[in-house]
Image (cartoon, rainbow, N blue to C red):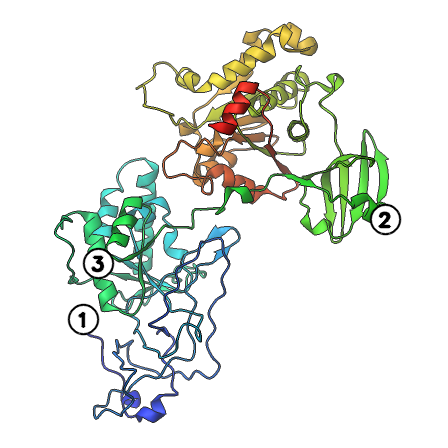
Amino acid sequence: MPLPPAPSRRAALLAPEDYDAVARPRHTQDLLPDVALKAEPASRGGRKSERSQAAVVVELAAPALIQVETKSRTPAPTPAPAVAPAPAARRSTSTRSNGAGKTAASGVATAPVASSRSKKSAPQGPAKLFVLDTNVLLHDPTSLFRFEEHDIFLPMIVLEELDGHKKGMTEVARNGRQASRTLDALAAAPGADMAKGLKLDSTGQRAAGGHLFFQTVPLDYSLPTSLPQGKADNQILGVVEALRKLHAPREVVLVSKDINMRVKARALGLNAEDYQNDKTLEDGDLLYSGVLALPADFWVKSGKNVESWQSGAHTYYRIGGPIVPQLLINQFVYFEAPGEPSLFARVSEIREKTAVLQTLKDYGSAKHAVWGVTTRNREQNYAMNLLMDPEVDFVTLTGTAGTGKTLLALAAGLTQVLDDRRYTEIIMTRATVSVGEDIGFLPGTEEEKMGPWMGALDDNLEFLAKGDGGNAGEWGRAATNELIRSRIKIKSMNFMRGRTFLNKYVIIDEAQNLTPKQMKTLITRAGPGTKIICMGNLAQIDTPYLTEGSSGLTYAVDRFKGWPHSGHITLARGERSRLADFASEVL
């Protein structure tokens, strides 16, 4: 790297004792050599760093790389001044905003400043330098703006690999082209200087306050002979090793989605982390369930202040107290206690310190059967109330195998399409991800190609169409299997871009295998009068690189909770068979 310009004359003329109280300019970082805080997961909130009020800015000609001796404080005969311990240090902890994770990073041209303070007296650590692997940009092209006030370094081999992946119509190719356009926009911004770093907020991304640095000169590094020097991954590891030596004691961290890459980095003594921004939740157990149990003393504390009234077939209760801040619109609540009246209701309104609960329709009784299907447990009844409500446009159902997700959605859809004429037809789609090896190309039309993926549809239609599957009503006895299938269209997700569904009942099965971007593409197809149901089992994800925390289904559940026209239920108990229930628990 080229040597930076020397400090200005004003800084050089200061006496060492006068210079001790002077802080560095705004573009430099206060670094503590003995503090290396590991970046926390993206779901943990962090605070933005605050500079000390006593800091005084000295204008230097450029951010000089200054080597400082902390042991000796004797004034040197040369005009280069010694730098005192910095009054403040930035946090290196990653933060999350509105459910989207952010990872910390630091600059490359910033001078590392030594400090005599210990870890105990300085809980805050220095900003880090994060080196991005190619797969991070291909996974999330907006990852450049997820590092808050910290800086990013891109090795030259990353740009080469990015160029090699930009051709084609796959999701990876699209992300590669978007990342390339983002880099071009940053480089073309007014005042952009690659030598000093490209400001990440120059294109309007105010959340990113750091700089982007490219590898412009060869770096000197040495790796074990067992690692081939020509491999791209090993070249990136060499860049990380060189940067660690060049900017010591600054912490340099490799960010990669490749597990083996992170393992090799740690084996070489390098810091490596996974990219956390794609994870909606760190723990799947924190996923919104859609159900809340009221406390055992609910009627004792709130019974006297509850206001109730009747409207149609529903009873409404206006409640207050400390339980209200925990409630969300369309969340289900229940109260069950011996000797006390039970309550099963849905939150229909929230106003400051009060909430209105609406009693439910019992779809477990035969007189309220939906296409011959009656609910068998509490969660299934909650789900059917959401599926049959015309004011709820988006429903998400999660649960283990055999909990009745597809059957409930299909029965509600047939009733509202054929009986109520609320929707014109049912559109069913799913992610075509194989559990095992691919069997090759499938012949026929779009629906014929999707046929093998729709085995669940055939199984449930067989149950709903036959007479002994329950009392299907007048329509169920008269309609043939052909009539039912004439109202059900099977579509592939590959051709969803640009479509608009009007007055359709859309079922997205196996939604746990969708990425957040694919989920957004499908949901935004909804036109006026359309209802979308997303179903899936987060324990059966077959898509590579997707986890429970980064699945599109988890993303949709977390983002739509509390919206007045959406609802979610986690089905807890399996109803398929005792064999299936036991297998779900022990296998």
Which of discs 3 and 1 lies nearer the camera? The answer is 3
Compared with 273, 218 (above or below) is below
The vertical placement of 219 against 458, above or below, is below
Determine which of the numbered discs, if any, sits on residue 432 in the image. none
Mark 2, residues whose alpha carbon is within 10 Å: few (<14), some, or many (≥20)? few
Name which quarter of the figure residue 199 lies in.
Answer: bottom left
The answer to whether 456 is drawn above or below residue 110 in the figure is: above
Give the secondary structure at mark 3.
Answer: helix
Q: Which residue type carries mark 2?
A: Asn
Question: Toward which corner of the image does residue 570 lie, by quadrant?
Answer: top right
Q: Secondary structure at mark 1?
A: loop
Image spot of residue 445 (x, y percent): 39, 16
Q: Residue furthest right?
A: 304
In this rendering, would 492 be left or right of 151? right
Which labelled disc corresponds to residue 239?
Answer: 3
Residue type at numbered disc 1: Pro
Determine the residue positioned at 43% across, 76% down.
88
Q: Residues within 10 Å of mark 1 (few under 14, many from 20)?
A: few
Nearer the observer, 460 or 181: 460
Q: Which residue is mark 1?
A: 2
Separation of residues labelled 3 and 1 (CA atoms): 17 Å
Can the viewer see residue 177 in this picture?
A: no
Q: Bin the neighbour count of mark 3 within 10 Å (Cα to Cα): few under 14, some 14-19, many 20 and up.
A: many
Which residue type carries mark 3? Val
Residue 289: percent from left, percent from top:
60, 39
Quarter of the N terminus within the rendering: bottom left
Which residue position is annotated with label 2?
Answer: 305
Q: What is the C-alpha distance between the residues marked 2 and 1?
A: 74 Å
Decide: is 336 above or below 82: above
Residue 137 image offset from top left, x and y in percent: 33, 49
Of callouts 2 and 1, which one flags the residue occurring earlier in the amino acid sequence? Answer: 1
